Amino acid sequence: MVYVPNSTTLQYTGLNAATSGDYGFAVVRSSIATLKAAGVEVFLSMGGWNYNCFPYLYARYSVGGYGTSTPNYWKIETFGKGDINNCVDSNQFCYVCEPPAEGTSLSDFEIFPEPEHSSTWVEATKKVEAHADSTNPPKWSYDMVPGQAWVDSKTGISVTVPGNGRYATLKRDPYQDFVYLAKDLGAAGIDIDYEEFWHGDYFKVGDAQGPWILPQTTYKYAAIIYDTIINIKNIAPTLKLSTPAGAVGAWSTPWWGGNLKGLWYNVKQMYPDTITFMSVGPNAGGINVMTYDLSDNPQFHECPDDNDCPLDKQVAFYMKTYQDAGIVATVGYEIGVPAYPSPEHDAAHQLPLTPTLLRSIVSQTQSQFKGAFFWELFKSQNSTQYASATDVAQTLCTAVLKGAPRCKGSLPPPL
């Protein structure tokens, strides 16, 4: 994204609120003010699945990087006839990021860039380098610029890096501009939704058989957070900072690939001030654990252990890893049909949130944590057997806010 302070336009921010004029800036700012007046804190979020997915690298090193018996390898079998070399531009690298039904194109995907020209990015990387593992020092990917060609040194294949390189052309820092935008819109905080699974799988360290560690991804994420924190302090000191964290993000031992396992644990160990800034004190927006999109498929060992396969037990297990790591975190809930496992391919092993499971999680796990969040407000429920957005909102509000009057409110159904 690119946003020049005081320009009051969303043209190059990616919000797509309008297609002309100020591209919706005034409408968004007015809406934020209305919500703020009603006691709601509004955060802007950067990232998310599509804005973290590098189709070529995710296909080759995540989905297809661990043999044929992995949860999403079926996509390579279906769209690439079982051969990773058949996963190419024309089939969006076997549609590993989004299925054909989503109607996406390669231009819909992006990555978190490393803006080497930025003084605050350089300051952030120096903080990272000062406390890095000397046996695995940081190796910044400055050759990986969105919109430009990049050569995979492991295969010699050249691909275009997802995203728009306007920030590089203009010598701007997207993380700094994100802070400027939040300030000018009157937002209460910003959210860094980092889910670059491909990065962890491509840059992992260890022998061929594993297990592995992911120091380079730890460094990249920490640098992004440091850059953001530096700019918050310089530009908008009251701005809050939050981040969604993977369910397995506080895993404390080496891993066998996928899902950024242990990333937040590693950051806590090496760069604890980043975790503290987001979770404790006046700038704490929350470390929000995505304890959903979980599976109980034994074929891929997707339960944390044999005794913790049901959704409520998995949530309890993963949240305890955050407690054990000393990370103040909030519990996550998902409305309706989970995004994973694929509802078309493996619906039998999905773990949707039902009213019964909702109450079980709240009574067994939520009571140990001060915060909760859910995804998402207006997601279609698809079935009356799932907990509705209103049911989740009222239940969590009552548990967290101890029966505040607003807990009796209802959410309008999705259009």
Image (cartoon, helix red, strand yellow):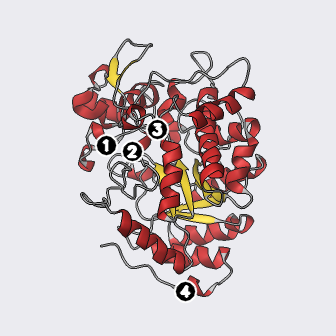
Spot occupied by residue 357 in the image (x, y as percentages of width and height): 56, 67
Q: Is residue 88 visible?
A: yes
- Local crowd at mark 4 within 10 Å, few (<14), some, or many (≥20)? few
Residue matched to label 1: 108
Spot occupied by residue 362 in the image (x, y as percentages of width and height): 64, 69
Residue, far left = 90
Spot occupied by residue 172 in the image (x, y as percentages of width and height): 46, 38
Residue at 38 percent across and 32 percent down: it is: 169
Residue matched to label 2: 50
**Marks 4 and 1 close (CB-CB < 8 Å):** no
**Marks 4 and 3 close (CB-CB < 8 Å):** no
Q: Could you say which disc has been placed on residue 40 in the image?
A: none
The amino acid at mark 3 is Arg
Q: Is residue 168 above or below residue 225?
A: above
The amino acid at mark 4 is Lys
Q: Helix or strand or loop: what does disc 2 sit on?
A: helix
Q: Helix or strand or loop: what does disc 1 sit on?
A: helix
Looking at the image, which is closer to me, 34 or 409? 34
Residue, far front = 6
Q: CA distance from mark 3 to mark 2?
A: 22 Å
Q: Earlier in the sequence, mark 2 or mark 1?
A: 2
Q: Nearer the viewer, mark 4 or mark 3?
A: 3
Spot occupied by residue 84 in the image (x, y as percentages of width and height): 33, 23
Q: CA distance from mark 2 to mark 1?
A: 7 Å
Residue 43 as seen in the image, left or right of residue 29: right
Looking at the image, which is closer to me, 79 or 289? 289
**Marks 3 and 2 close (CB-CB < 8 Å):** no
Residue matched to label 3: 172
Q: Earlier in the sequence, mark 2 or mark 4?
A: 2
Residue at 31 percent across and 25 percent down: it is: 82
Would you identify the image quadrant in which residue 60 lies? top left
Q: Could you say which disc has been placed on residue 408 in the image?
A: 4
